[in-house]
Image: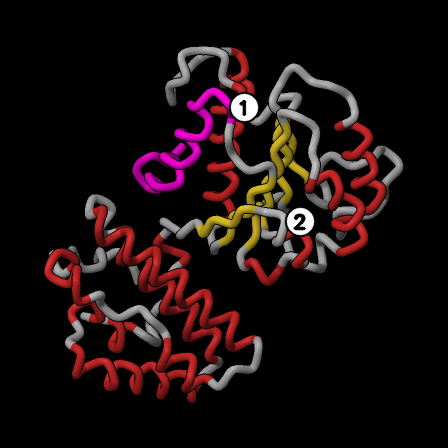
Amino acid sequence: MHSLDKEYPFLMKYFNNGIKAGQKNIAHCILFYGSDIQAQYDLALEIARMLNCTGDHTESCQCLNCKWIRENNHPAVLTISKVDNKPSDDTSKTVISIDQARMIKNDLLVTSDYHRVLIFCDKDKEGNLQGLNQQNFQSDAANALLKTFEEPPSNTTFFFLTKDKSDVITTVVSRAQCFYVPSMKDEDRDYSLVKDAMDGYLELERNEVLDFNDKILDIAKMVDPLEVFTQMQNYLEALLKSNLDNMALKVKLISDIKAVETAKKEYRLNINIQTIIETLSIREDKKNDRQNRNYSPISKNCR
């Protein structure tokens, strides 16, 4: 498995601190979103391992629980999808079903010595991980579990994996603590449309911001603005991957990725595209510009 501590230090530190406190003080419902569902799944498994570890609590611990979870074979760490952990008489193949939801509720009534972790996601025909959406995790199944999500049994954590928070019904999102998980895979990133406009954006002076806005707006007039915003996020993720050791810059880049996510949401609400771009706050914070300008360019193996 790739080094989650290096790729996602803020997330890993956050969950490490909550779990090491002895109280297992993390949210009952956690939603990960971003383009890399496999990375989200790996994070959920690692947190499940940390919650169930009975050994030395290191990344390489060899206790039985840690071994089971690394092998994805732990009895209390379950993948919930349209093809995983369904009742034997459930013939639905396209959704997490309401019968499946009822089975989960009943199973959770039985006490467990383990910390139970249920990871909700989707899979394609080949078994590859996919994100939740309102087609594969519909309101009837989700609503059947809302009370359980809200007041789960002790030692139970739910994870929801999706590409975009708006793909999951709001009643689930509102009950979850949400974390953006940037992709670290080069092949996921196409930012060819916005590269010329985005290059050097960290070095913009105040009098250059309007020109930057105009460039992005011109691109958004030619293609779907949602694709423009996605490619902006891809560019920022590629820049993030090239600067994993620059802690101050990582904070800014993650903040900027979230700002573009907000822009997507505003566009879906039919807010004027020019207004969205003019208020998109990804320009440099002048307080930190000297510190953040010491950055590495995007690696050549990124597109």
Residue 276 spot, x, y in % from top left: 42, 79
Reading the image, the residue beneath label 2 is 125
Q: 238 or 270: which is nearer to us?
A: 270
In the image, which disc is placed on residue 69? 1
Residue 155 spot, x, y in % from top left: 62, 25
Q: Is residue 6 magenta?
A: yes
Q: Residue at x 28, y 72 (%)?
A: 195
Residue 16 vertical placement versus 39 (above, below): above
**Three-letter amino acid code at disc 1?**
Ile
Residue 293 vertical placement versus 59 (above, below): below
Q: Residue at x 22, y 71 (%)?
A: 201
Magenta segment range? 1-24
Judge the density around disc 2: few (<14), some (14-19), many (≥20) Cα neighbours within 10 Å.
few
Quarter of the figure with residue 101: top right
Report whether residue 154 is seen. Answer: yes
* Disc 1 element: helix
